[in-house]
Amino acid sequence: MDDQQDLFFPEVVLSASLKFDYAKARGKQVAPLGDLFAGKGFTSNVDGLSVRIVKTKLPKGLEIVGGNSAPDLAFLAMPEHELSDENGLRLFRIDGNHRLSAANAKTSNLPTPFCVVLHDDPAKKERFEKVVFHNINAKQIPLTSEENLRLILQTGAGALFSDEDLLTKPSFGRAYWLARYLLPQFNEAFLGGLAKHFESKHSLALGLAQFLTAKQAVATNDDVTVLQGEIDCVRSALIAVNGYYSASCGQALRDLACHGVLTAFVYFALVNEGRQLPAFARWIDSNRIDRLSPKTTTRGLGYHYHLGQTQAVDAASLVDVFESVLKSRSRQIFISALMNFKWVAQHED
């Protein structure tokens, strides 16, 4: 919302009641929703809300293939005086509160698609709103980013974004450029121990690039020549890490296929010329971190009897904990004592 590029607001879901006072109707038969489905329309005698149904026709050329499927258009009208009245007509938000609150903080207006759910039973309306809100916010299955990243990072004639776009556009940045050029390195032919990780290779490439960039384990400028050299360094790190994953003791790591654990391995293969990588591999095995779940994820909950409750099974957590272990082990204690130098001289003789 800050840079206003590629900005789109998802649909806001609203709810309205078709109120009708049958005592005022003097015997007139009114079925709010039924009349709408029958194409008759509806006008409230309580708050003035009205719905007009207009039947449409398909263009001549389409009548042969779907003449009976032309859509009906519904026009919803709400009196302004009712909307401004404190006790008047109201539209209730089922979903979209956070998006609208964020938009209110900006000075510009944002075109926002919406739908309005109409009800003719107050009890059913309240129940429906609560259930739909719960379903939308608590039960939906998050979409993975793998397919979206495939489109963003693809190269060749059909590429949606150039290298310059990935480097300079506010929505992307250096990590996206690195991710694009890391993808060809994910070759199962010479990185067989990491093959299972490559099933979501676009997510892996971006997550790895973002972490290494944030930790300054790769170059921090946008010089393409320098960045290309960093790709070669990461390739060498991947080959070194593959050696641990391909070994017989790396079966659990291969089965886990956790991007976060792999990212931590690559990090220690890069920093300090890889001198800490063997110790990190032993630490992973001795603490059974290669058996933490959830699988194939970079973040999640996990538990280990040595580490206690961990907030996230991801690269940042693993690197922070292991580096703290290294720091504690590097402390030395110097003990000084009063020595009898005459005794020392005799002892040396």
Image (spheres, grey):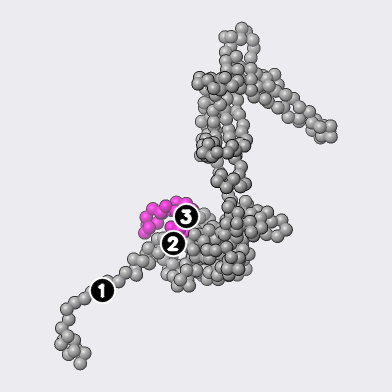
Residue type for callout 3? Ser
Was residue 39 drawn as part of the magenta stretch in this picture? no
Question: Where residue 227 sits in the image (x, y, percent)?
Answer: 58, 66
Instruction: Kindly identify the residue that appears in the image at 69 percent across and 56 percent down.
Output: 159
Task: Name the residue tied to disc 3.
Answer: 293
Of the two numbered discs 3 and 2 on the same chain, state the one appearing first in sequence: 3
Q: Which mark is residue 334?
A: 1
Q: Which residue is mark 2?
A: 319
Task: Measure the C-alpha gap from mark 3 to mark 1.
Answer: 42 Å
Q: Quadrant of the C terminus?
A: bottom left
- Visible in this render: residue 72? yes
**In front of the other: 144 or 162:** 162
- SS of the residue at dot 3? loop
Image marks 1 and 2: residues in contact by CB distance under 8 Å: no
Q: Amino acid at mark 1?
A: Phe
Q: Is residue 86 above or below residue 177?
A: above
- Which is more N-terminal, label 1 or label 3? 3
At a point 52% along the width and 54% down the height, the residue shown is: 297
Q: Point out the stretch of residues depicted in magenta.
A: 299-319
Report which quarter residue 46 is drawn in: top right
Residue 303 magenta-highlighted: yes
Return the disc, 1 or 2, that comes first in the chain's sequence: 2
